[in-house]
Image (cartoon, rainbow, N blue to C red):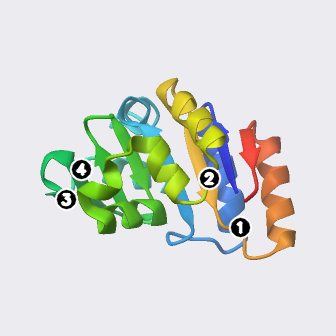
Amino acid sequence: MTGMFRDRSSAEKAYQSLSSRGYGKDDVNLLMSDETRKTHFGDNTAHTDLGDKAMEGAGVGSAIGGTAGAIIGAIAAIGTSVALPGLGLIIAGPLAAALAGAGAGGLTGGLVGALVGSGIPEEHAAEYEEGIKNGGIVMGVKPRNEEDAKYFEEEFRRHNGDKIYKY
């Protein structure tokens, strides 16, 4: 399940709904532009679990994949983060770990290719890419059961989520 949020407050509330059901760092994917990260989660913003996750992926890590220019860093509560400087993206969570494991070959398709590779249909991946370019924050989780899926869909909508899809 994925959804896009237009501001930090909405994303924070959606993230809290995931945490309230016992979902943690190995369950949540977070995607945003580096510019969005700096705007909503930069040095002069309040510290929260989601904010700390977004920030800690910004500069910690080592380069992979030769010319891919990806940086891998630890994110406190979400896990692995990949910064794609050429695209100006921050990707945190299981998707980042998969990209890191794939090396440069996994990054050549850009964001749409990475999302499609993670099971998101190409038309939705393109919508998310456009939304991220325009300052959106995409959050994704694999619900453990139908009850959680229904709950997260309702919570994402309640917190101004857009382009909410279940897979």
Disc 4 marks which amino acid? Answer: Ala
Q: Is mark 3 in CB contact (under 8 Å) with mark 4?
A: no
Q: Is mark 1 in CB contact (under 8 Å) with mark 3?
A: no
Quadrant in the picture for the C terminus: bottom right
Of 37 and 133, nearer the camera is: 133
Across and down, in percent, residue 83 comes to 30, 47
Q: Which residue is mark 1?
A: 20
Q: Secondary structure at mark 2?
A: loop
- For marks 3 and 4, give the CA distance: 9 Å
Q: Secondary structure at mark 4?
A: strand
- Name the outermost residue toward the top: 134
Disc 3 marks which amino acid? Answer: Gly
Q: Is residue 59 left or right of residue 57?
A: left
Whether residue 48 can be seen here = no
Across and down, in percent, residue 30 comes to 51, 51
Residue 155's place in the image compared with 111, above or below, is below
Q: Which residue is mark 2?
A: 120
Label located before the other in sequence (2 or 4): 4
Task: Look at discs 1 and 3 and give the one toward the viewer.
Answer: 3
